[in-house]
Structure formats: structure tokens, C-alpha cells
Amino acid sequence: MSHIYLLGACAAKWAQEDIGTEYRNSFNWGEGRRLPDESKIVHIVCDRALRGTGLTSVRSLGERVGIVLGGCFGGLASYERFRAGLGKAGELQPLAFSFSLPCIPASVLSLYYGITGPVVSLSTVVEGGGTSALSTSIGLLQSGLCDHVVVGTWYFPSDTALQCTGLTQAMAAIAILSSKSEQLIGSALNIDSATTGAQFNSGVPGITDSLLDFLSFRSSPDTQCLYPLNSVFSASRRAN
Amino acid sequence: MRRVVITGYGIVCAIGQDKDSLADALAKGRTGVAPVTLFNTDCCRCHSAAEVGSISPGTFNRTERFLALAAAEALADAGLTHDSRHMTVFQGTAHGPLDLWERGGDACGAQPARLGETIWKEFVEQVSVTTLTNACVASTWAAGLALNAIRRGEIELALVAGAEVLTDFLFCGFDALRLLTPTQCRPFDRQRNGLVLGEGAAVLVLESEDAARRRGAPIRAEFAGFGVAADANHLTAPDISGKGAAAALTHALKDAGNISQVDYINLHGTGTTHNDRMEVNALKRVFHDDVATIPVSSTKPMTGHTSGAAGAIEMAICLAALEQELIPPTVGLEEPDPVCKGLDLVGGEARQHRSNIIASINSAFGGNNAALVIRRYR
């Protein structure tokens, strides 16, 4: 089995009202202004994760890069907005209908970074997002569908999501995995040979608990980026 | 590389609530499109859809009843009993069991990840479920993930499912986007003016060839190839150049063993001008002049566009076409649009044709394209 490397990771949490400002400060992209907040948080975190990894030409990553994003309650803020206009003449917002699709944040990344490889959106339960996304992304790499994967999870406290989870902050966590580490910076964690992790249903042994924790928001503080990889993953690196 | 075969399938859609009635409808070119009865469409421009109609009552919501019926048929078709200990499910849906929520049920339990939760547990002791929400390629993608998991040797058997239900949210949303036809869905026709929505579910049983042969399972076809590509061009509109869909199809044909000849292609064929142009360009990019030798059609005028379930439902249609030795027609296609010049579009009636290799293509909001290839098993 070929090795898979972790090139970098970022996670962040926001209060809803701070997202717009943060996004405007991060991007000068016309298309981005109309995006729903859940896409904006994924975009901000992905940008931070990508820029620290050594990948070049991040606006035209091409067909050997894939995306796997897992989210629970995806698209619901837009769903709620569109739904509120149903039955009221002139109040329907067609764009809100389009943005209610849970796959929109992944499509935003594909569009912005020129990613034309496999793009997957997963619906997950709150506690299972990291495992499902990681398992799927490793499967894409092992099947040779791409060489690098942007893998992540996100949560946005729409009215419904808030009612179901009680979680008030918007969150996103993104990691960059690769099966081609030799082209990149040398500090990548070799996930496959790590020995401390959980077994899960992709059949990949030794995935680190810490990466799963990171993608499931269990270990990261409000904002954290890791490149070269340190702290959170140090135990796994020692095990290598 | 391990070969993967399809040993059973089941379907519930507007033109049939089992595979036999599906095959009959495909042969006769029968459409399931009729005036909407599930909800009020007074505030919409369009008033037709392909509803499943009355289904046997049960404890589940409508989406899950579709799924339960299709799963029961698929498992029986594959000769599998309901007492399997463990099963892996890859399922695709755009919005999940929205009907549960919209009829006053629990919003927290109506999310896509909860789709089929009760059903799968009824069938097996332990179930591992991956839910894809890639809009209209969700269940095509589900099939691809299952294929590759079996090829990698992680599992020997998987269920692939797609399910979508018509709700006023979905209907009014497409209507607000001006994507629904106020007249008749007729992909690739000069007069085409939009899509018609549908609903339903399909479930397919995938197994490694070795596992299927070991248990003497009926092998319906080989699942030979899968390919994907993103447009990275526009958030909600397809890339008219067809580059992404062409890349997905090219990858699928390569994955199936570098094949260059296909006997039939089931197109995404929604009935919108943009999709038609994109798809025609994609076919010409892949096959050049040889495109004239490949019969193609869209079955969405019969089933309606079933969003996240479309990939699985159209895969079931391809299996029926293979088994029944026919090519389903593009119902409503009377005068092909000039942009389709050079294509062998099957309109009017089903064509008798013994296919060995069939491809199916789907494309989605967000510029996501996926294609798969099935092959007559030898």
C-alpha cells in the first residue's frame, strides 16, 4: 500500500457576525461576495491550509487534485432563506435555492482553485464528519483518482442546526493529503506508517487519532494552522 | 485489479415500482409525467412532474419507503437474505428525507446523513453508510466509491443507493430558477425548454466477481469503469464547452480498459438548452466523428429528473436496457436541434439493440461530472 502524507492543516471557529469581515479581508473575488457564509468559512480555512503546504499555482491546481468535504446540516441557512419566501409573491430567492445544496462549499473550492479532479461532498452526523471525510479522501488517493486531496469538515449554525446541536460557532477544518510527497516540503507526516491511530472502514490502518480529532473540531483551538506539522501531530510523528 | 459485478438491482420511480415494470415502460416509451398531486403548484409557472404515485403504506416517510422497496427488490434479485451480518452502503441524495421535515417531522432527523438509517438497520446487523450529497451526481459518485472500495479489497459487497423525493421546496426552487418546462420535457429537440422533476430510488448490489461466483450469485453485468471531473467554471451553470463531462467520460472509458467503442450512452439529458449543448460538445470531444455510430438517449422525459437519485436510477435503466436488449427512447424528441447534428439520437420508440457496453453520464450544479461504464458479463 502506498504511503499517504499530511502536508498541512488549518482549523478555525467564528461567531456568525464576524464571517463577512474576515472574508472581505481575505479575498478580493467578485464571485465570492454573494456566497453564503458557510462557503466563506470553508474558503478561508482552505486558503490558509493550502498556502502553507508548498503546493504551487494554487489558483490552477488542475485534475490531479481532489476535494472531499463533509458537513452536517449543510446548506440549511440557504434552505431556510428560500423556504421563508415560499408562497409569498416576489419573495423567493433563486440563488438561495442553489446555495441550499450541501455541495456548494466544495464547488466553491473547485472554482476558486481550478480543481478539476474528483470533488466529493458528504453528509455526516456531527461527530462522524472527520472519519467519513478522511476515509473517503484516502480512498481517492489509493484508487489513483488524484494525487492530492483537500479534505475537510465544516459546520454552520443555521437556525435548524442550532436547534439540533446547540453549537453557536461556525467551524471549518481542512487538511491537505498527498500520495506524492517527494514533490513537496519534507515535513509531511506519513499517515500510513503511523501506528497510533484508529482503524476505520476504509481499511487503512494507523490513521492518527489526532488528525481525526482535528477534523472533528475536538482538538483545535479557535484558530490553528499546522505547517510544518507540529504540536497536535507530534505524538504520531514520534511513533513513525 | 479485481473485477466488480452487479448481482441485483431494484427500483421505484414514476414509470415502475419494480424492475419488470421499468423494463416494460422503457420498451413502450411510457412517461410518468403528469400534473403534480403532492403539493400545490399555484405559485409556480409549471405544474407537472414524474411522481411515483401510490406506494404501499408503511412506517417510513416517503423517501425511505422508496428506498425500502428498492432495497428489498435488489437484495432479493441478488439472492441475498435479509440476515446478513454486515453491509456497506454508499448512497447519494441531493437533499435527503426532506419530506419528513416538510410534513412536520423532526428537522434534526431529516438531514441527508440520516437517510435510510432505519431501513439499513432492518436489513443487517451492522451497517456502514457513506452519504454523498453531490447534487445530481450524488448516486453516480456513490457507485464509483463502492466500485473502488471493492477493487481495493476493502469490502466484497456493497449496496449503492440513490433516493430523492419531490417536495414543494425542490419544485418551487427549480421553478424559481426558470429551469422547469411549462410544456413537455424534450431533451435535444429544437423546441426543448426545460426539465421536468421526478422522484424515486434505486438500489444496486455490487460484489467482487470472486465473491459473487463463490456464492453462485446471478451476475447481471460487470461494473467496468468510473470517471469524474469538475468543470471549475461556474457555480451553478454547466460549462458549455463540455470539457468536464468529456473528461469524466474519458476517464470512465479508460478505467474500463481503454475501450473506444460503446453500444449505448444514457445521457444526463435534462432538457435545458445549456445541458444539451454541453453534452453534445462533450460527446464530440470524446468520440469525434465516431459519435455518429453510438446510439444515445435521455430517459428523463420518462422518469423526470430525480436529482441525487438520477445516477442510480439511470444505472438501473442501463441494466434493464442490457438485459432487455433495447435502447430506451428520448420521449418527446421529434425534431433534433441542429446542435445535435452528427449524433445518433434515439427518439420516438425504443430500438431493439443488443449492447455489450453501456455508458451513463451525469452532471450537477457546481460543475461536477461523473460517468460510469457497465459491460455484459462474460
Image (spheres, coloured by chain):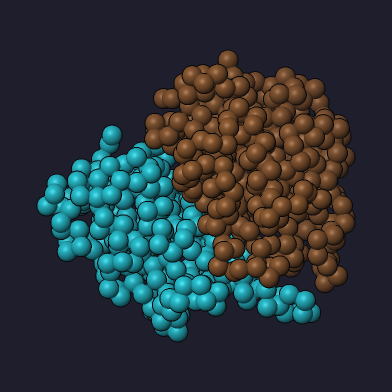
Chain colours: A cyan, B brown
Looking at the image, can residue B116 be seen?
Answer: yes
Residue B306 coordinates in the image, percent (x, y):
70, 50
- Residue at image position (71%, 77%) is A85
Residue B253 coordinates in the image, percent (x, y):
54, 30
Q: Is residue B109 above or below residue B210?
A: below
Residue B369 coordinates in the image, percent (x, y):
57, 46
Residue B211 coordinates in the image, percent (x, y):
47, 24
Closer to the camera in the image, A156 or B196:
A156
Looking at the image, can residue B247 be seen?
Answer: no
State left or right for residue B91 relative to residue B28: left
Furthest residue in direction left, as rendered: A238
Q: Is residue B226 above or below residue B106?
A: above
The answer to which image quadrant residue A22 occupies is bottom left
Closer to the camera in the image, B363 or B86:
B86
Closer to the camera in the image, A183 or B160:
B160
- Residue at image position (37%, 42%) is A202
- Residue at image position (61%, 22%) is B218
Closer to the camera in the image, B16 or A18:
B16
- Disc tally is 0
Furthest residue in direction bottom, as rendered: A17
Which quadrant, please, contains the N terminus of chain A?
top left
- Residue at image position (43%, 76%) is A167
State left or right for residue B347 relative to residue A134: right
Q: Is residue B81 above or below residue A167?
A: above
State left or right for residue B291 relative to residue B180: left
